[in-house]
Amino acid sequence: MGGGNGQKAKMAREKNNEKNKAPKGSQLETNKKAMSIQCKVCMQTFICTTSEVKCREHAEAKHPKADVSQCFPHLNK
């Protein structure tokens, strides 16, 4: 006879765990691809989730003579 529901659930869980395992290795390559925002003055790159506030902080701290829109043209609205 087959197993009970408990055994079936355990087998299904194990099968799903194998499917959903995170890929092994480094995430450095993925992080490099996510660096999509770039300061046009110094060419420093920022991760794509960087907020407008952080971009403005960078521009004010590193390039006080340059306008924020010079550093980050995507902030022009």
Image: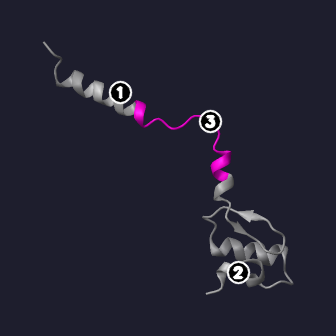
Residue 1 at x, y percent in the picture? 12, 12
Residue located 79% across and 85% down the image = 67
Q: Nearer the viewer, residue 44 or 65?
A: 44
Q: Of the residues shown, which amino acid type is indicated by label 2?
A: Pro
Q: Of the residues shown, which amino acid type is indicated by label 1?
A: Glu
Q: Nearer the viewer, residue 54 or 29?
A: 29
Instruction: Please report whichever mark, 2 or 3, sits nearer to the chain's N-terminal start.
Output: 3
Q: Which residues are magenta?
A: 18-31
Residue located 57% across and 34% down the image = 24
As drawn, 57 above or below 9: below
**Could you give the CA–CA distance between mark 1 and mark 3, rounded to whole angstroms?**
22 Å
Q: Neighbour class for label 1 at 10 Å: few (<14), some, many (≥20)?
A: few
Residue located 51% across and 38% down the image = 22
As drawn, 10 above or below 20: above
Residue corresponding to mark 1? 14
Residue 41 at x, y percent in the picture? 83, 75
Residue corresponding to mark 3? 25
